[in-house]
Image (spheres, grey):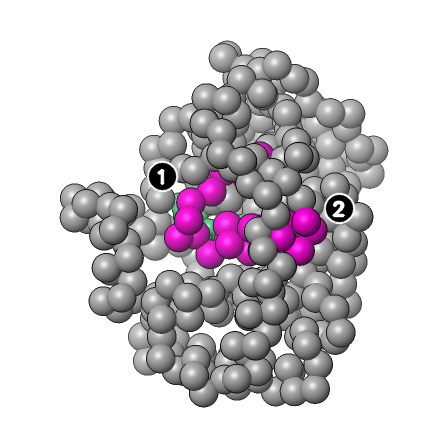
Amino acid sequence: MSELILHHYPLSPFSEKIRAMLGYADLGWQSVQVLERPPRPLLAPLAGGYRKIPVAQIGADVFCDTRTISREIARLSNKPELVLENCSDQVQAFVREVDLDIFLACIISAGNLTLLRKVLKTASWTELVKLLWDRVRMGSKARVKTHSPRQMKRMVRDHLDRLEAMLDGQPFLFGEHPNAGDFSAYHSLWFQRDLAEQKHFSRYPGVNAWMDRIQAFGQGEPREISGQDALNIASAGAPRTLPASNHDSDLLNRVVTIAPDDYGRDPVTGTLVASDDREWIVVRQEPSLGNVAVHFPKQGFIIKAA
Ligand SMILES: N[C@@H](CCC(=O)N[C@@H](CS)C(=O)NCC(=O)O)C(=O)O
């Protein structure tokens, strides 16, 4: 069992990306299931206001965004192909597109009765209304390119055509073996194919076979623990040794805020203790826990002096 704790919920596509990576990495991990919307009172002391899911934790270190989480999985399993920055420029550009525009197009255009029925298996109508209201509010504050429902359906179709062509003659999108690009493309399509059961997938045999190949890796070995267990683990430890800093010398050791630049832009405030070409780390003093180090990728986030 690795020390990695994943805070996630079953219907979350980005969590599915990480669960699939954990399967590929063949890791044991600890699972904390959180609500589909804030408030998440047992996660807030760790993530300090970052509102997106998933969040990972190793002791008193907390990892926001699947970029930093996949780096930890790569380190624990010795699978460098899961680190986006280790992939080619072509893969990196592909992931920037699929993790934002294609993700939003897939999620927004997936809504149908099948999905509604699945959501209502675990949530009441009241909970569903609260969830939708939360997403409307988050969307109204987002800074993302908007598209009409028709354009989004078209984007998904074009994307599937493109993937079908990429998979012609090879098992994974960029060759014989999977890399970060496969897992990023997989999770939004999982939402469309496996959760919303969208019919158009039958026209894409190559994409279906590739998704099945990713699912055949499984999800590693999760063990359920409670949110309180995760807090106890954080308070029993201390953040790990910091990596060397070679960036942002003017902000180092100052109080900063860091927030995503697209949607769910709630900021986290803390002291910037490390900055390299890929990552910022802030330390927050949490009364119930002591020091917690929160890791953010630089790509897709904005830092400001507080
Ligand atoms: N760039 C983020 C995106 C994460 C994301 O958008 N997660 C969705 C769930 S799949 C989310 O947080 N939605 C709002 C929420 O769950 O509160 C990452 O790579 O982790």
Q: At label 2, which amino acid type do we have?
A: Ser
Q: Percent x, y for residue 276? A: 77, 41
Q: Percent x, y for residue 149? A: 31, 75
Q: Is residue 6 magenta?
A: yes
Residue 263 is at least partly visible in this image: no
Q: Percent x, y for residue 205? A: 52, 84
* Residue at 77% in and 53% down: 79
Q: Quadrant of residue 153?
A: bottom left
Q: Which residue is mark 2?
A: 77
Q: Is mark 2 within 8 Å of ligand 1?
A: no
* Residue at 43% in and 52% down: 12
* Residue at 34% in and 49% down: 138
Q: Quadrant of residue 174?
A: bottom right
Q: Which residue is mark 1?
A: 35
* Residue at 49% in and 12% down: 288
Q: Specify start and end residues of the magenta stretch as a single range.
A: 5-26
Q: N-terminal of the two: label 1 or label 2?
A: 1
Label 1 CA crowd tier, 10 Å (few <14, some 14–19, many 20+): some
